[in-house]
Amino acid sequence: MSSITPQEIKEEFLKSKIGIVGITILVILITTSIIAVITIPVETFQEWNNPANWISYPKVAIPIWVNLFMVEKIPEHRIFENPNIQTNSENEIFSSSHKFGMNFDYEFFPNDFIYVFSSEYSESVLMQIKVIRPDGIKLDLLSTSLPFSNTRTIHSERIFSTDESIKKNLLLQSEKFDFNLEKLSVEDIVFSQTKTNQPLKGNYIFSIDTFSVGTDIVNHESKLIIGGKAFGVMGTDELRRDLAIGLLWGTPLALFIGLVVSIASVIMGLLYGVYAGFKGKKTDEVMMRFNDVIYALPALPFLIILSVTISNSIFVLVGFLMIFGWVGIAKVARSMSLQIKTRGYVDAANMMGQKNSKIVLKHILPQLLPYAFASIAISVPAAITTEAGLSFLGLGDPSFPTWGHILHDANTFGAAARGLWWWIIPPGVMIAITGLAFVFIGNALDSIVNPKLKR
Amino acid sequence: MGVKRYVATRAATMFGVLMITLLITISLVGSNMDTILKQGIVFQVRSEITENPSIAESFSSVDEFEGFIQNQIDQRTKILGLDEPWYSPQRIGLTMYKILFLDFGHATFLTSDSGSSDVKDIIFEKLPRTILLFTTATIIISVIGIFLGALSASKVGSVIDRITSSFAIISSSFPVWWIGMLMIFLFAFTYQIFPARATPDIPSSEPGYIVSLLYHMALPLITIVMIGFGSWAYLVRNFMVGIIQEDFIMAKRTIGIKQKKIIYSHALKNAAPPIVTILALSLSGSLGGAIITEAVFDWPGMGRLYFEAITVMDLPVIIGATYILTVFFLVSIFIADLLYGYFDPRVRTG
């Protein structure tokens, strides 16, 4: 083994194409992680398993960009949060009107629509929901009174398009349509052409008017959801969760697991191996037998038992992965240090009476550093895939869902059978890309450290 | 160090590892196991008394009755030796002794296909299937890998060499089980060629069982081979490249022996020791990796058994399966060691 200076390694590395590709991917992944951590607060991410947090989102929605390739556009799931508000007060009558304008440009009817609101008022309030369609027809959907209250109160409600009174109101206006409305659902009527039951494209205005006598109304929330089958950059899953958030947050988690496990195991392995090799004789024998024992333990069954019986926290799991990670490196480090030990300068340092610890740290370890970097890079993918595998079996940390966890959910809800490709492909691709980045870097380093492979 | 001494030290290490594995497994699951067994006894005593109303009627007061029940429970606990904690030396010794001779006791929830709840029966029913799938896969992988590796080693830098190397690198970073999910998605649902569940749907007694089993095995087999052969080819290539640079190969070339003969008979023979070792190791390694793969494909082997046992916390099965997996793993490491020592005498004497 010839000694290579860090400068040479850097130069050689910049020459290798796959090394550059690996570094590029890694930089992109790190950027993604930083963006994820900054833009999506951990609190949001920890709500991953809380269904209430995702209630406004659609079930198993396809990513919206799919529409770019489709001739017949799939309706997007849209959430309108900022209505156009007008308030009036005339002769003790307070009225406010919330208008949501939307452009509907799809070949299919939306799934449903939901109006979510929360208002502060006292006594009684009348609420009217109307829609003005692109063809100018105005449909009255609902007029209802909010619950009476003597004191000032906050009332929150979700009005669903499946509400029976909406259907009744529409049936009263059936003369506007040329076909029988009896068996159609509300959204199929509201968004339909008048001649045939086909979706009508154009601008719709939903207006929600509230009237009250004597008191004013303060709206805390007013949100219109038009339910569709496409949502977000990565779609949603069965539990309405936005997969983009899960995938984004998976990046820092995977990098954390991979890097911490591999760096720690390489350091442990190096120190262990070098010490054993340097000491030699009985110490070496005993330490290598112990190494053999750990080496012969079947890793995956043990990881499973450990995570079931002790804890499935992500931090504890990182520790478990380290237990099985350092063994191979220790073996190689030992044989390398056996070679270096015989060199003249180590003998010289020994004769000069330098402390053992100093010889190991100053003269032997630096020689092994290039190898150490290569093995760090090479052992990252194994750590990531092992963690993903454990999570896939449902043994991962539920409070920090990783890519493996998303795939576990996909498998439980039968995503493959139902053709939900956007639930299966992206997490796996992310695992593979992250692994590839490190394999590339590792290979580039490896061919510098072991020049024999290059030829 | 002589051959005998070499074999003896290896064997001793392996036996030590086996014992340590057992000890760790027992200490990890021991306390849970005790609680479950004790609950089982209480349940058993209570149900016996409810089935037999005359026992309850023969007592005059409630206290006396409760005392009788407690007495019964204590007696049975003592018979089973559960009055001592699981970490007492006698109990651990007894448990390990039993396990060593494959007496794993009875499963709490799981049963074999034939209905037996004896852990030994369950395991020996599942084990052949796992061996069938993964041994077949490993053999196919190694054959493809050796030839592809030798081919690319003979033409270093050629198109085929580059394709093999990049395929190896790329395929090794995909998790097998994820490719499995994609394969199920593609070939079981989108194009309905193979069944989605790998469990054969007819009982093992029927004549068509073997055919059905093989048909159901196809998809997992293809997946495992697809992901596995690349890295094999890459390994073989790297060994071969090292050997081809040696002087004796150069000498053979100068004598005028054909390139093909040099590669496939002389160089490959010299690359045999590491290749055989890796073969032995990957055979056993595949058994451990089987847990996730079998869970994806629903292949009724050891891996899925292990997964099911973990899900319902069926401890006797977990201990039994861990033991068997460890034994297989150790035996193959042992064989690999011996083979390596046989092929490469430097290991024995060094």
Image: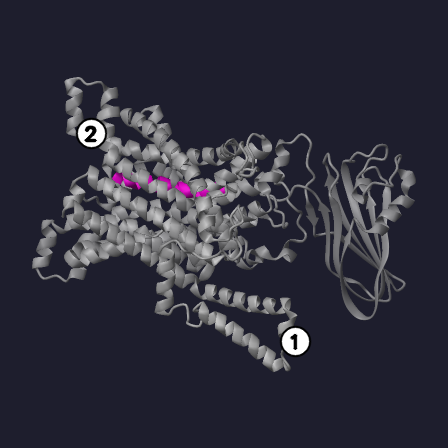
The residue under label 1 is B57
Residue B179 spot, x, y in % from top left: 48, 38
From the viewer's perspective, is residue A167 above or below residue A397? above
Is residue A442 shown in magenta?
A: yes
Image quadrant occupied by the C terminus of chain A: top left
**Which one is in front, B243 or A443?**
B243
Image location of residue A416, percent across then percent down: 58, 40
Q: Is residue A73 left or right of residue B114?
A: right
Q: Nearer the viewer, residue A439 or B248?
A: B248
- Taking the spot 54% from the left edge, 57% from the top edge, the residue there is A41
Q: Position of residue B339 (x, y in %)?
A: 24, 40
Q: Secondary structure beneath disc 1?
A: helix
Instruction: Please report the bounds of the magenta region as a residue range.
Output: A428-448
Q: Residue at x 30, y 41 (%)?
A: A445
Q: Is residue B96 above or below residue A374?
A: below
Q: Is residue A425 visible?
A: yes
- Answer whether residue A222 is magenta in the image: no
The secondary structure making up most of the magenta span is helix
Numbered tag placed on residue A359 in the rendering: none
Please name the residue shown 19% across and 56% down the image. A284
Q: Is residue A71 positioned above or below A392 on the image?
A: above
Q: Residues within 10 Å of mark 1 (few under 14, many from 20)?
A: few
User: Callout 1: residue from which chain?
Assistant: B
Residue on which the image places disc 2: B245
| Kind of residue at badge 2 | Gln
Residue A264 lies in quadrant: bottom left
Quadrant in which the N terminus of chain A is drawn: top left
Please rate how many residues cluster around mark 2, counting C-alpha atoms within 10 Å: few if below 14, some from 14 to 19, many from 20.
Answer: few
Q: Quadrant of residue A317?
A: bottom left
Looking at the picture, do discs 1 and 2 lie on one chain? yes
Assess whether mark 2 and mark 1 are in contact (beta carbons under 8 angstroms): no
